Amino acid sequence: MAYFTKLEDNIVTEVIAISDDVCGMPTLTFPDTDSAGRAYIANGLKLAGTFAQTSIDGLFRGCYAGIGYTFNPLLGQYGEYLPPTVEPEPTADDYTVQPEPVIEAP
């Protein structure tokens, strides 16, 4: 299987799988499979939007992309996927810790 992400403003909103043979595998390799797969998605599946191939084993474009990942076309030779950043959850200390009062000597 070959995996392609649907991108909206370079954010992955969907991941689809298509058969290797429609991408020309094993005869073709990346980046040629990317072009063949995008052509099949547009003309064969008739799906609109921007799609880009992702690698299940991370051999190209940095890592396997999931929903919420960002595609940066300026990284690497063919662009790379970046995982979403997660903000740390606030803890009780974030709300209850008060600064120590400053007591000046007389």
Image (spheres, rainbow, N blue to C red):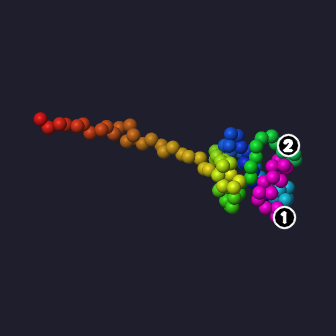
Residue 79 is situated, as x and y percent measured from the top left of the image, at 68, 52
Q: Quadrant of residue 60?
A: bottom right
Residue sitting at 80 percent across and 40 percent down? 48
| Residues drawn in magenta | 25-41
Given residues 10 and 22, the one toward you in this image is: 10
Q: Position of residue 82 (x, y in %)?
A: 62, 50
In the rendered structure, find residue 27 and report the number of the disc placed on it.
Answer: 1
Residue 7 pos. (x, y %): 71, 43
Residue visible at 19% across and 37% down in the picture: 103
User: Which SS class for mark 1?
Assistant: loop
Q: Which quadrant of the view contains residue 20?
A: bottom right
Q: Are marks 1 and 2 in contact (CB under 8 Å)?
A: no
- The kind of residue tagged 2 is Lys
Q: Say which residue label 2 marks.
A: 46
How far apart, in angstroms, are the residues tagged by discs 1 and 2?
24 Å
- The quarter of the picture where the N terminus appears is bottom right
Relative to 36, is 42 above or below?
above
- Does residue 65 appear in the picture of this structure? no
| Residue 37 shown in magenta | yes
Dot placed on the residue nearer the N-terminal end, 1 or 2: 1
Residue 21 position in % (x across, y down): 85, 59
In the displayed structure image, the side of residue 48 where residue 86 appears, left or right? left
The residue at 30%/38% (across/down) is 99
**Depicted 99 relative to depicted 27: above or below:** above
| Residue at the far left in the pictured view | 106
